[in-house]
Amino acid sequence: MKAVQGLHHLTVMASDPQRNVDFYTDLLGQRMVKVTVNFDDPGTYHLYYGDETGAPGTIMTFFPWPGAARGERGNGEIVACAYAVRPPSLGYWKERLRANGTPFQEGRRFGSPTLSFEDPDGLIIELIAEEGADVPRFWPRSPVPREHALRGFHSVTGWVESAESPRRLLVEHLGFQKVGQEETPDGLRLRFRGDSDGVGLYVDLVERPGQPAGQFSAGSVHHVALRTRDDSEQAEYLEYLSAQGYGVTPVQDRQYFHSIYFRDPSGILFEIATDAPGFPADEEMDELGKHLKLPAWYEPKRAAIEARLRPIVNREYGVTIGGGGSGAGPGSTAQAQARPLRVSGPHQGQPVYAAGRPPSEARVAAVLIHGRGGSAQDILGLGQQFNLSAFTYVAPQAAGQTWYPQSFLRPLEQNEPGLSSGLQQIDDLLNELEAQGIPREHVVLGGFSQGACLALEYVARHARRYGAVFGFSGGLIGPDGTPRDYAGSLEGTPVFLGCSDQDAHIPLARVEESAEVLARLGAQVDKRIYPGMGHTINADEIAAVQALMQALAGQSV
């Protein structure tokens, strides 16, 4: 298996799309090589910048959410992107930044002079002056002269609690070499080099023990993509990294490259992307970035998508793209939100936590119900695993960390008043989401263990169309023989049920019965039984629900 070459691209959240375009094209002199949409959230642009062709190792990509607040830098994320420039160009760039009113700081890193400044959303951009290769493909219309042009990526910097797990990933599994370390005011900086002589060679890690984790929003890096040559090489990494326990996603077709994703224990989300097919795959070279390009499955919704997107001007061609939609921005992560109360009970008045986009600005939502002994904050971690930016994620907290006191197989009255109070809490949440413009048809409802039981019981008792339903290790509530003559219809609702054949808490027979009842109510049930898995959640279950959510996000435009 060949070593990874280095950096492919960096994907970042932004706020105002036009401000983003102006900074990276007008100030930094990069070409906007593609205007498309987030394939998981077609109401949001996906903007790509790079050299003339968008070569790997030059590509910055952005998901702009208009109105998004700035994120907070912290451990567990990439916090800076450095471009290479020629040493004689530093003076030019200092004058250019001053003329634009962009503050900067000068410094040195591993002996090389640097300039450091921020993009409009707070992402740290650095220029590192080193001799080396020329610009991969200079963009002739760049406002920056060729001799001073950015020469592709130099490096990225990640902040971590400890560098040990990402070091192991980079060196032992991906073929990077450690080439240096130095003490800095932020902490010990370690540098790793990929297997190439071209652009984008380095990944830097700064150890910051005891410092807080980052808070994701505008200016935050979503993931860093590493570069592999072709599909066969990527397939080797998929198999190898999966065997090492990294929880790698299946291959995703991003039209211009193919991708696999996995999260290192440090918190950093990595991608391995192929060089091909490249950005000229669906546009002529001299028209890159001139049109809104959509994948074939979104073309039937082009008018609706364009209407949602804010207009942006590509000054290379003097064209306006997009139709003026208001867009949306993400809310703060894991903050308690006040909810109107409708009934009394042990769970009414408990906090509800949210992540992703605020309900008032999203089109789709996921309501996540935690299990016995768990917490709303814990179950919100599924949002990171689903990794879908279109969604608002909301999670209610159970009083005493349990929705009902006894086993879900005990007589119903023995689990009151907690059971009814928990069901009412779900109903209150769904009603509030609907009041904020997200109908039940656009809501994914699910949970784990006791939370899965509560979610499944709710949809059975309130059968109607939902965006999707999932139960990880759960089933309908009540002892054997409980009447299941529920009213209503789940027609058109996809339901995923996943469980082990050897779960000490969830009898297989109850999962089978639940699948039959929900199917009888009209749901499209995908039931998967995993031999010997035990009482947990596996990667196949996450991928199955993620696919349902991706489909819903696409349908919601």
Image (cartoon, rainbow, N blue to C red):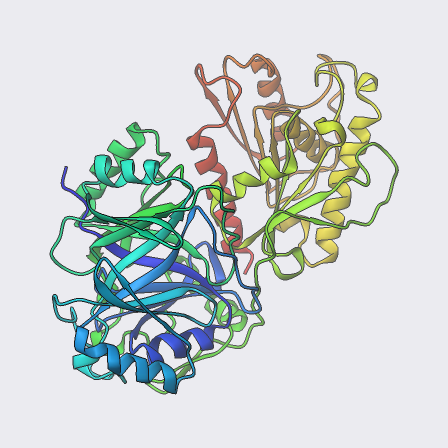
Quadrant the C terminus occupies = bottom right
User: Left of 286 or right of it: where is 23?
Assistant: right
Image location of residue 101, percent across then percent down: 43, 83
Q: Return the residue nearer the eye: 199 or 414.
A: 199
Please state the total of marks drawn on the protein image. Answer: 0
Q: Is any part of residue 226 visible from this angle?
A: yes
Quadrant the N terminus occupies = top left
User: Left of 410 or right of it: where is 211?
Assistant: left
Image location of residue 134, percent across then percent down: 13, 70
Say if 273 sits above or below 499 in the image.
Answer: below
Q: Return the residue nearer the eye: 483 or 121.
A: 121
Q: Is any part of residue 316 visible from this angle?
A: no
Q: Return the residue nearer the eye: 143 or 394.
A: 143
User: Left of 529 or right of it: where is 23?
Assistant: left
Image location of residue 304, percent across then percent down: 52, 68
Image location of residue 85, percent across then percent down: 21, 71
Q: Residue at x 48, y 78 (%)?
A: 311
User: Left of 76 or right of it: where is 340?
Assistant: right
Quarter location, residue 503: top right
Q: Residue at x 26, y 71 (%)?
A: 283
Say if 16 sits above or below 178 in the image.
Answer: below
The single residue placed furthest to the right in the displayed view is 344
Say if 98 sits above or below 534 in the image.
Answer: below
